[in-house]
Image (cartoon, helix red, strand yellow):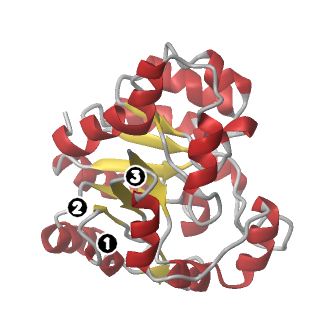
Amino acid sequence: MIDFHFHAPVKEFLEFLGDYAEPAIKYFNSKIEVKGLKETLDYYETFGIKRFVVLPIDATTFLGRKIPNQVITLDDRIVRFVSVDPLKPNAEEELKSAIKEFEPVGVKLHPQLQGFHPLDERALRIYDIIDSNGLVVVFHTGTSGIGAGVKSKIRLDYGRPIYFDEIAVRYQNTKIILAHFGWPWTEEAIAIALHKPNVYLDLSGWAPKYIPQVIWSNAKRLSDKLLFGSDFPLIRPERWIEEFKQVNLSQDIKDKIVKYNAERLIDKRS
């Protein structure tokens, strides 16, 4: 299996959340333990997860902090994704440098926590680089458990799936993953994934028994477009895996979700 949405190391993730950490843990009803990265990955490998898409994030301009790209070099089981702050004046140069240094599979962008509209011209210049290098891009979409219930400048509108339809049209060779299937605009995200051959949905941030039924009802049509992701440490992979066993889908579709769709994206990128 491949966990396509993993936040680690936990210590760095909690430091990144800062004042949002406690409300986010409450929002997800999570129990979080701070353990070393190797220990964490060793533990989840016993559940059959062989690779982990660890997602750094650079929100220097908007939040004043980041999880550095260097975390992706800490273990060979990590599928390398980098992040860049699109609002930095030197964002394009930083991304080009990160691609050269880390040789990533893709890029992680979080419009809400990085404070940019998905169609901002500065962001489009980042997409140009992603596209020209044949990289995958993971976008946070939907609501944000980070910042929920507290005063902030986080704009939920930046997570509306419909904006990524335009991105999919402009960058038709770029594989685009809409993380968290865009809830509460889930049907909007499904419509885009069904319509655009380069758009995928990851199922992270939700325990399977709470994932909206509309996802499972369309799983056969979306069988090549759905990706297992836990959102660790906010959702624990062992819980996700156990609850997924109870979902009424054929085994071949389940196998695609937990392994084969991700393999096709990160190994072939075609």
Mark 1 or mark 2: which comes first in sequence? 1
Image: 80 above or below 248: below
The image position of residue 1, as x and y in percent, is: 38, 44
The secondary structure type at the circle numbered 2 is: loop
Amino acid under disc 2: Pro
Residue drawn at the location 69% of the way across and 40% of the way down: 183
Quick one: label 2, few (<14), some, or many (20+) residues within 10 Å?
Answer: many
Q: Are marks 1 and 2 in contact (CB under 8 Å)?
A: yes
Q: Is residue 86 in view?
A: no
The image position of residue 174, as x and y in percent, is: 28, 39
User: Residue most toward the top?
Assistant: 221
Residue drawn at the location 59% of the way across and 66% of the way down: 233
Q: Are marks 3 and 1 in contact (CB under 8 Å)?
A: no
Image: 242 above or below 38: above
Q: Which residue is mark 3?
A: 49
Which numbered mark, 3 or 1, is in the foreground of this view? 3
Q: Which residue is mark 2?
A: 104
